[in-house]
Image (cartoon, coloured by chain):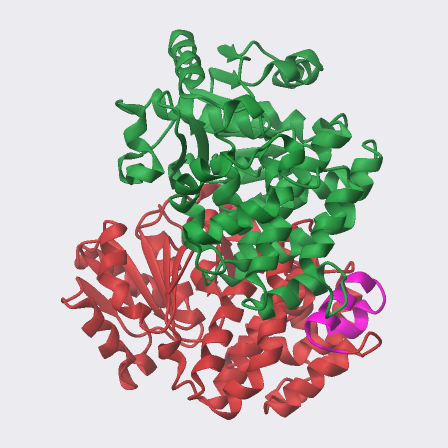
Chain colours: A red, B green
């Protein structure tokens, strides 16, 4: 059992789920409120959590939509207050994690909710939320150790809420929970984690420990993702994919880049239901190609980590990997149309991630990135 | 300026010392008490700190001995209380850092002091100490981000105090402060950091992020230590040595090993005034030789990081490096005698670090290690 303490106390291994009561006790949570999604109710994993808990939670919200919304978060917040809960268990993928964080904000902060958002410098208004234990079931967004939550506001904007106070106090990472993740989700969430590692390494922010973790994560995911996609019951592969996801989020404390800027922006197109991880995977090779020779040392470091020859084409490696694990070849294959581009550009340019891209990125660069990824 | 937040908020770069007042303000420290040693008073660095502070501290203790003692800590504690201080600035090498932590314990915990020690499972009695800002002037012990403090008790035992509460809340790592560090101290403290990185990587504890940081630190120190020793004014070298020291301490959250077990034990021999870093450097090659093939994957990883051939002798590399930077060839050259061995063995076996050695280590193994290192 790995016990890894940074800002989050993380208990990591097969069987870690059994630690849930002990961790809640350590956090002082006597009336936990579970936030999860309908799929985890349907596939039996919620039952596994309840069994590990050993007692009725104070309350539950199981209706997390595929992308968390302000209104769903508010509904959860009402239930939280009605339950007299004093702590949160976020159980699921990035959506449940982020909705749980949004709900935590709502039950502890004056409204309006949107004034806490990153795009309006709302971080200064954010303080403590109830103690939060995050238990991921994908590998993954890394939201279990990250300071952010992405939520679609009532006004339609996809906003990122960022604060050290949103970093979960504790995380339980039990790869058992991912054994049943279907191949396509394994591939998509796995490449989300890969994108975290790679974009984090490439930011110009000076943070050698985070960068070293990102390189390690990229190597780990590169080694294990195909095995995890081909055979979801491969326990070693699932362990390493969950660790790679965890490392990706530790790494992105040094920032992300244009891939996330564009995928956040495109993620706003509700009707297409675009998956964040798949978007990242599809856009990543083109971002790498656009960076070109401007991050030569870091590209060299990533090539070594991924076991590539010194002159290998890193962008092509990612594109080929995407193809081998069954991800779409481009945005068009996901239903994105040329006309979706212009509306996304403004949002992309103002995304926090753009500030730390490896090369300066403005509207024209995003137009080019979108064009190539289409 | 690198801002790296794990358990400690670390501000890292040339000029970071200027951030001292801002950091103290963030910690809520209005009456800071400085802990340092006579050498820093003599060489002008204390004056630099006071200039950066911009105001009189509430009080100061400048008498830290080469190895911190319980009685010196108690003297500092008296001065702290008399000054009505509400926070601590530890300024110096590992001794000042550790004395500051010991003093912090004394002013906030009931006596006797020794019941808080690691060897008597005292961690459970340790709670919050006053806010501590650590500013290292060597590269180094990494004590600015570590949960430990090594103190010679009044009864003669060299005890390790360990607790998450001893991790400094903030650290300012300004390589400017190390520009004047003489070659021998640069070598000795540099190899202390190298030993942290290597022993941490080799522990069997599962903690991939800490391990990745340790590998990065070893690579960094291996690349820059000779330059730093040869030319102390090399600003890049000093930056990287301080970062390598920081990384070594982040890495050893996954534990240390027999090198530290033995060097802690030998460090008790007062009259020899054995330097912790030099002891580590001299013992390390022999510990690596004794581990042999029992950590093949990790040795391979370290060889790659250090730029060695796949079949290179890691132990010999360290011995050769020691020689090139002017460190002694063995314990005998430091004044240690064969009869010092037996008394040290019991202490080594019961040292916390022994629990996480790469291979099981008991009395016989320590005897062998001591014999070889002599």
As drawn, B227 above or below A49? above
The picture places residue B125, in percent across and down from the top left corner, at 27, 35
Does residue A319 appear to the left or right of A178 in the view shown? right
The picture places residue B323, in percent across and down from the top left corner, at 76, 43
Q: Residue at x 61, y 13 (%)?
A: B38
Secondary structure predominantly adopted by residues drawn in magenta: helix
Would residue A304 be counted in the magenta stretch? yes
Does residue B306 appear to the left or right of B68 in the view shown? right
Q: Is residue B13 visible?
A: no
As drawn, B23 above or below A85? above
- Taking the view exactly as shown, the residue that stands out farthest to the top is B82
Span shown in magenta = A287-308
Does residue B207 appear to the left or right of A280 in the view shown? left
Q: Residue at x 45, y 73 (%)?
A: A67
Of B172 and B241, the residue lying toward us: B241
- Taking the view exactly as shown, the residue that stands out farthest to the left is A55
Q: Is residue A226 visible?
A: yes
As drawn, B326 above or below A171? above
Which quadrant does the N terminus of chain B fall into?
top right
Would residue A40 be counted in the magenta stretch? no
The picture places residue A243, in percent across and down from the top left corner, at 49, 69
């Amino acid at each position: 059992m790995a016990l890894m303490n940074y800002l989050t106390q993380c208990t990591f291994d097969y069987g870690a789920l059994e630690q849930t009561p002990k961790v809640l006790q350590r956090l002082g949570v006597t009336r936990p409120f579970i936030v999860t999604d309908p799929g985890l109710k349907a596939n039996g994993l919620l039952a596994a959590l309840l069994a590990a808990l050993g007692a009725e939670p104070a309350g539950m919200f199981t209706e997390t939509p595929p992308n968390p919304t302000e209104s769903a978060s508010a509904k959860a917040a009402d239930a939280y207050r009605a339950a007299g809960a004093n702590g949160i268990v976020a159980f699921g993928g990035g959506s449940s994690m982020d909705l749980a964080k949004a709900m935590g904000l709502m039950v502890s902060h004056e409204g309006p909710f949107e004034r806490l958002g990153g795009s309006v410098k709302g971080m200064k208004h954010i303080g403590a939320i109830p103690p939060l234990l995050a238990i991921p079931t994908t590998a993954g967004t890394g939201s279990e150790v990250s300071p952010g939550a992405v939520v679609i506001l009532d006004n339609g904007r996809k906003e990122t809420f960022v604060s050290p106070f949103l970093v979960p106090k504790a995380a339980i990472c039990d790869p058992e929970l991912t054994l049943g993740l279907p191949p396509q989700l394994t591939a998509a969430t796995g490449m989300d984690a890969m994108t975290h590692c790679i974009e984090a390494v490439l930011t110009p922010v000076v943070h050698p420990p985070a960068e070293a973790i990102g390189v390690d994560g990229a190597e780990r995911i590169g080694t294990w993702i195909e095995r995890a996609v081909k055979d979801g019951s491969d326990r070693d592969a699932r362990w390493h994919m969950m660790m790679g996801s965890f490392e990706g989020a530790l790494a992105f404390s040094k920032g992300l880049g244009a891939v996330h800027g564009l995928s956040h922006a495109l993620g706003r197109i509700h009707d297409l239901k675009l998956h964040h991880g798949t978007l990242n995977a599809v856009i990543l090779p083109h971002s790498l190609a656009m960076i070109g020779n401007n991050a030569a040392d870091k590209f060299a470091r990533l090539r070594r980590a991924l076991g590539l020859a010194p002159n290998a084409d890193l962008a092509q490696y990612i594109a080929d990997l995407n193809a081998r694990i069954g991800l779409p070849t481009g945005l068009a294959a996901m239903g994105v149309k040329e006309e979706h581009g212009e509306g996304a550009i403004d949002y992309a340019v103002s995304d926090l991630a753009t500030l730390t891209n490896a090369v300066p990125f403005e509207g024209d660069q995003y137009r080019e990135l979108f064009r190539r990824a289409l």
